[in-house]
């Protein structure tokens, strides 16, 4: 009898579980917030690398963002046409500067191939190439690197170009989708935030089950008393 009383006194009450759930929810939300802040920092690193224009740094920053997002629970809220959607992922990031550099490089290539057009200053594109290509060989520039593009544009700026020439040059621009990234996050991961979320969900489920059991017993007790009184009076 003494053992049973001790066992009964140690039973955790439902209201105690509910009180325990409150700080656990706060801790879980804080951990999710930390992961989200880290993800934002990594996205900012991608933007910084995009502005700098170093392909290797852009690749490394994207890979780091992808690795972190794929291994952590990142919750985002996306707004489209006034509708808000909750999803797991990094959210879209657009390499705007990289796209601009690609477009500029394509235009430069088209301009170089358009040397047959007449210009009062001669073939200004060939003249720009004559200045920049030796520098490219000296410093290891590629034709689409920021340094080569800057050199090329600076040389072209020395000559007044014709609007007719510019309008006649046709360039097939790349799709912007090639420069947009959106990494997916798992719903659950074995991180502090993920484990805490699992604990909160299990505890909340236990509380809900206990509540329904309590409601069911109350209803059964009420109807049981009514049936007992009915049979006694009949």
Image (cartoon, helix red, strand yellow):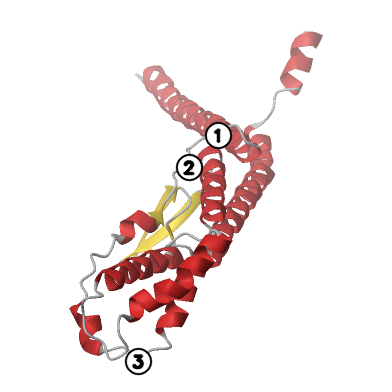
Q: Quadrant of the N terminus?
A: top right
Q: Nearer the viewer, residue 78 or 108?
A: 108
Q: Quick check: marks 1 and 2 in contact, CB under 8 Å? A: yes
Q: Residues within 10 Å of mark 2 (few under 14, many from 20)?
A: many
Tell me the tag on residue 185: 2
Residue under pointer 1: 189
Q: Secondary structure at mark 1?
A: loop
- C-alpha distance separating marks 1 and 2: 9 Å
Mark 2, mark 3: which one is toward the viewer?
3
- Residue 17 falls in image quadrant: top right
Res. 71 in view: yes
Q: Position of residue 60 (x, y in %)?
A: 56, 48
Q: Quick check: marks 1 and 3 in contact, CB under 8 Å? A: no
Work out whether mark 2 precedes mark 3 in sequence or the reverse, and give the earlier one. Answer: 3
Task: Identify the residue at image location x=56%, y=62%.
Answer: 138
- Residue 7 falls in image quadrant: top right
Q: Position of residue 161 (x, y in %)?
A: 31, 88
Look at the picture and state if 220 lies above or below 173.
above
Residue under pointer 3: 160
Q: Quick check: marks 2 and 3 in contact, CB under 8 Å? A: no
Q: Residues within 10 Å of mark 3 (few under 14, many from 20)?
A: few
Specify whether 10 is left or right of 118. right
């Amino acid at each position: 009898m003494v053992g049973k009383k001790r066992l009964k006194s140690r039973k955790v009450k439902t209201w105690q579980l509910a009180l325990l759930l409150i700080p656990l929810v706060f801790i879980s939300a804080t951990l999710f917030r930390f992961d989200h802040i880290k993800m934002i920092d990594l996205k900012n690193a991608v933007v910084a690398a995009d502005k700098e224009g170093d392909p290797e740094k852009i690749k490394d920053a994207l890979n780091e963002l992808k690795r972190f997002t794929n291994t952590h629970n990142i919750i985002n809220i996306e707004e489209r046409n006034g509708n808000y959607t909750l999803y797991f992922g990094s959210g879209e990031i657009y390499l705007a500067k990289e796209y601009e550099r690609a477009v500029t490089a394509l235009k430069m290539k088209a301009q170089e191939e358009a040397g047959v057009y007449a210009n009062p200053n001669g073939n200004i594109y060939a003249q720009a190439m004559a200045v920049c290509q030796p520098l490219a060989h000296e410093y290891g520039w590629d034709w689409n690197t920021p340094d080569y593009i800057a050199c090329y544009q600076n040389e072209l700026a020395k000559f007044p170009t014709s609007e007719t020439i510019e309008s006649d040059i046709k360039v097939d621009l790349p799709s912007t989708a090639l420069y947009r990234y959106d990494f997916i996050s798992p719903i659950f991961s074995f991180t502090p935030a993920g484990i805490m979320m699992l604990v909160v969900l299990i505890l909340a489920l236990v509380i809900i089950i206990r509540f329904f059991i309590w409601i069911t017993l109350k209803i059964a007790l009420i109807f049981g008393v009514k049936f007992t009184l009915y049979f006694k009076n009949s």
